[in-house]
Image (cartoon, rainbow, N blue to C red):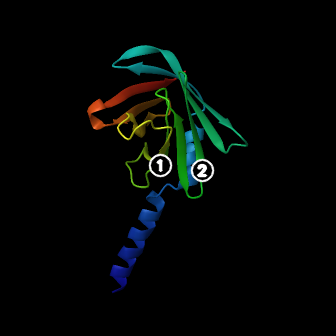
Amino acid sequence: MLSKLCVLSILICGLSAARVGPDADFDRIKALQGNWKIEAEGKPLGIEMSYDVGSKESIVAERFGKELSIFYRNGQAVEMIHFCNVGNQPRLRLKDVREPDVLDFEMFAITNLCTPDTPHVQEIIYKMLDANTMGLEIVWWPKTRGSEKYKLHRS
């Protein structure tokens, strides 16, 4: 009986250690601060991505060309608003369950959507490859529109 209890305690501690939490997740986003070069299909784009921490470190502003996204803490969640070039503003929330080194944001609300069939961003996935490189995937709805994939390198 004691050995089963020890094994259960070890499993619970391991799961607790594996959970990242909103503070650590938001700190990972703040650590992106600076400028990043963007490439698509192995070719450099003529624009950069930048991250700026602001408002007493309560937000991170992401600029992708002329698009703007704002990351922030909302209680126990990390959320973002994406001000899209198509004119709508999806609100996305960081998923609780995800792969290590992946920040996977899924849409939970949207403003300024012309019709329910209007294409819009459904998911934005950041995959940290190392301290200076990340993959970015922007998933559109409807799925037939596909996704955009980028690789970013810290400048």
Identify the residue at horizontal 42%, vertical 38% (top origin).
124
Residue found 38% across the figure and 34% down from its top:
118
The image shows residue 117, relative to residue 2, as above or below, that is above
Query: Which secondary structure, mark 2?
Result: strand
Task: Give residue 83's position: percent from left, percent from top.
Answer: 53, 33
Disc 1 target residue: 94
Is residue 19 something that shows in the picture? Answer: yes
Q: Is residue 132 above or below residue 41?
A: below
Residue positioned 44% across, 31% down in the render = 134
Query: Mark 2, residues whose alpha carbon is within 10 Å: few (<14), some, or many (≥20)?
Result: some
Three-letter amino acid code at the position of disc 1: Leu
Outermost residue on the front side: it is: 115
Quadrant in which the C terminus appears: top right
Residue 20, position as x, y percentages in the image = 49, 54
Q: Residue at 33% across / 31% down in the picture?
A: 147
Kindly state the secondary structure of the residue where label 1 is placed: strand
Q: Which mark is residue 73?
A: 2
Q: Looking at the image, which is closer to me, 85 or 21?
A: 85
Residue 129 in the image: x percent, y percent?
Answer: 41, 34
Asked whether the residues under the numbered discs 2 and 1 touch, taking CB atoms below 8 Å apart as contact, a structural biologist would say no
